[in-house]
Amino acid sequence: MNLSVDDDVLAVSATRRPFNESVFFVYQKTQGKWTYIKTIDEPRVEYDIQCHANVAASRTEVLVAGRREDPPGSDRTGRVYIHRLPDRDCNSNEVPDACELRDGLLEDCNGDEVADVCDELLFADSDFSGRVDLRDFAALQRCFSGSAGGLGRCCRLLDAAPADGGINVIDLAAFVQAMNGPD
């Protein structure tokens, strides 16, 4: 068995018995949950000595490599396949997220080229670091609108009370309670 993880894509290889063929399973993490995407059953090569299946994952592709362990001097080699993953559509509107990001219809506040609707969200973690710290406090200050209301770009993670329409003292109090990172 072989495993490869790249941020939010997971690829796992396994040997299918009794045929000694490799099969690969691809999962994608969306909003904190791993979801099955596809099964890759290439390369379908029967190995007469020993089967080794390797896999590497990226956000857009899975590379599958099968190699033979034949006697020295053998001219038989393995194979490499590249499988493109389907376009991500985290908000299930049948429009690829990459298109919506390009057109400004979705936000990518942390610049990872993944729409924020796909990221695991932690209240007040504006930089997606997994903790609420002084960097997030700087973002809270930039987003603070007081009684004027209105949310600037990428401020929604700092809004503890969305009904009031802005970042204000209510959100500041919730932020202080949420702080869990280093000073």
Image (tube, rainbow, N blue to C red):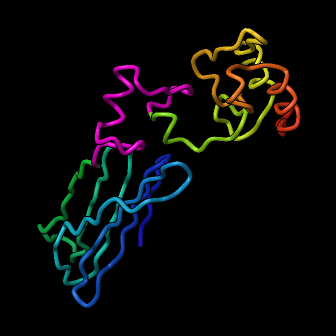
Residue 130 x/y as whole percent: 69, 41
Query: Which residue is painted at 28% across and 80% down in the image?
Result: 50
* 150 is within the stretch colored magenta: no
For the C terminus, the image quarter is top right
Classify residue 149 as left or right of residue 33. right
On screen, 71 above or below 119? below
Q: Which residues are magenta?
A: 86-113
**Residue at position x 39%, y 62% from top?**
36
**Which residue sits furthest left?**
75
Compared to 86, does 111 lie above or below? above
User: Residue 20: where, in percent of width, then height?
Assistant: 25, 83
Q: Is residue 126 left or right of residue 31?
A: right
Q: Main secondary structure of the magenta part?
A: loop
- Establish if 106 lies above or below 73: above
Q: Residue furthest front?
A: 163
Q: Residue at x 31, y 37 (%)?
A: 96
* In-front residue for pair 28/24: 28
Pick whichever, 89 or 2, lies toward us. 89
| Magenta stretch contains residue 109 | yes
Q: Relative to 21, is 121 on the left or the right?
A: right
| Res. 175 image quadrant | top right
Q: Residue at x 24, y 83 (%)?
A: 49
Image coords of residue 43 (percent x, y)? 19, 67
Q: Quadrant of the N terminus?
A: bottom left
Total count of labels: 0
Q: Nearer the viewer, residue 135 or 6?
A: 135
Position above or below: 38 against 137: below
Furthest toward the bottom, the residue is: 18
User: How far across and how far down the image is residue 27, in percent?
Assistant: 41, 59
